[in-house]
């Protein structure tokens, strides 16, 4: 009984093992079939990839050949254009050099003409200066002669007055001498000036000389200070004329105002002529020099302007700026 059960169980186990083996065999066969299909698919895909890769390589080779040909043609074209540009630049540089040489030649001609005109101006200036100097010397000589005559006349008048007073009494002489040497105070426009009566009497034809002359002593002896409503600053120069005999006008004074003061004090106008001569000569020379320098400066300006206009015109014709000459020269080379 037990053996029968064991055998039944062994038979059942054997059937189960056979079924399991069959199942495993079927799965194995299925996997082998799947692997065969997969290998076939891989082979097919590999063939397709190799075909597509070969097609891509062929297309790439064709494209590279086309691009290489195009680039070669472009390089040849660029080289041809570069040679043409070099020829154009060289031609433009030659034209510019020729224009510059013409400008330099024109500048030399203008400079020569300017120097010639400057020499002519110098000759004219020398002749004019010689003529003006001769005229001024003649005028100065005439004025000095008139001054000498006036001084001689004053000396003779003083001698005659001295002779007329010689026969007076000793007491009278002392009184007159005291009156002549007495100090007087002049208040001119608020400024006070002190001098001696004898100083003012040296020029009897002037206002102060006549005022303090011997014939008017009765009018002025009762006072020692006198007021004049005039310009006190200018009177300092006028008083120096009585002291030193030279009338020099202040440098910054208005000529009309100075002339009115001279007319009021009755001063001789010829006394200031010798002092005006150097000033007149200086003004004439300054005017001539200004005219000469102005003409020279005008010609220099015209030359510079002409050179600039010509350079601008050349730059416009060549299509280059003043700072591109070096680049053009290097490109031409």
Image: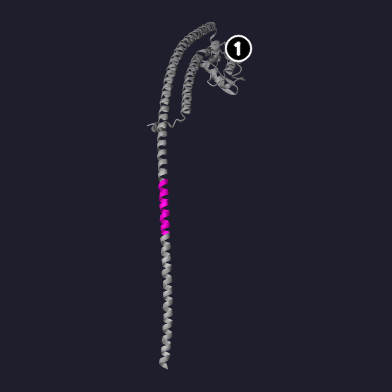
Position of residue 31 measured from the top left corner of the image (x, y, whole percent): 42, 70
Question: Residue 329, position in %: x, y?
Answer: 39, 31
Residue 113 visible in the snapshot: yes
Neighbour tally class for label 1: few under 14, some 14-19, many 20 plus, Cα within 10 Å: few
For mark 1, what is the residue? 216
Specify the farthest residue to the bottom: 1
Residue 245 in view (yes/no): no
**Residue appearing at x 40%, y 36% in the figure:** 76
Check if residue 59 falls in the magenta segment: yes
Name the residue rendered at 54%, 20% in the picture: 236
Q: Is residue 313 left or right of residue 266?
A: left
Q: Residue at x 41, y 66 (%)?
A: 36
Image quadrant holding the C terminus, namely top left
Q: Nearer the viewer, residue 141 or 192?
A: 141
Hey, which quadrant is residue 107 in on the image? top left
Residue 125 shown in magenta: no
Q: Which residues are magenta?
A: 45-63
């Amino acid at each position: 009984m037990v053996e029968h059960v064991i055998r039944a169980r062994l038979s059942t186990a054997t059937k189960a093992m056979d079924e399991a083996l069959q199942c495993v065999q079927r799965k194995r066969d299925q996997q082998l079939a799947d692997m065969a299909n997969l290998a076939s698919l891989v082979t097919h895909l590999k063939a397709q990839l190799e075909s597509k890769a070969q097609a891509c390589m062929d297309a790439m080779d064709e494209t590279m050949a086309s691009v290489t040909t195009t680039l070669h043609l472009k390089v040849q074209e660029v080289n041809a254009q570069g040679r043409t540009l070099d020829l154009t630049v060289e031609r433009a540089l030659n034209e510019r050099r020729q224009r510059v040489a013409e400008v330099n030649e024109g500048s030399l001609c203008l400079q020569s003409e300017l120097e010639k005109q400057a020499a002519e101006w110098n000759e004219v200036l020398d002749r004019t200066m010689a003529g003006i100097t001769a005229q001024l010397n003649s005028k100065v000589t005439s004025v000095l002669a008139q001054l000498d005559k006036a001084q001689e006349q004053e000396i003779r008048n003083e001698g005659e007055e001295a002779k007329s007073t010689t026969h007076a009494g000793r007491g009278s002489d002392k009184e007159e001498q005291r009156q002549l040497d007495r100090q007087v105070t002049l208040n001119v426009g608020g400024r006070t000036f002190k001098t001696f009566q004898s100083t003012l009497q040296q020029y009897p034809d002037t206002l102060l000389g006549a005022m303090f002359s011997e014939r008017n002593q009765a009018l002025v002896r009762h006072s020692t200070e006198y007021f004049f409503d005039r310009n006190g600053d200018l009177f300092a120069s006028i008083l120096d004329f009585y002291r030193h005999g030279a009338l020099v006008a202040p440098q910054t004074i208005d000529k009309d105002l100075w002339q009115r003061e001279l007319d009021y004090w009755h001063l001789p106008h010829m006394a200031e002529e010798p002092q005006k001569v150097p000033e007149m000569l200086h003004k004439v020379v300054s005017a001539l020099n200004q005219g000469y320098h102005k003409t020279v400066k005008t010609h220099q300006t015209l030359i510079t302007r002409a050179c600039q206009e010509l350079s601008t015109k050349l730059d416009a014709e060549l299509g280059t700026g003043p700072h591109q000459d070096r680049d053009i020269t290097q490109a031409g080379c």
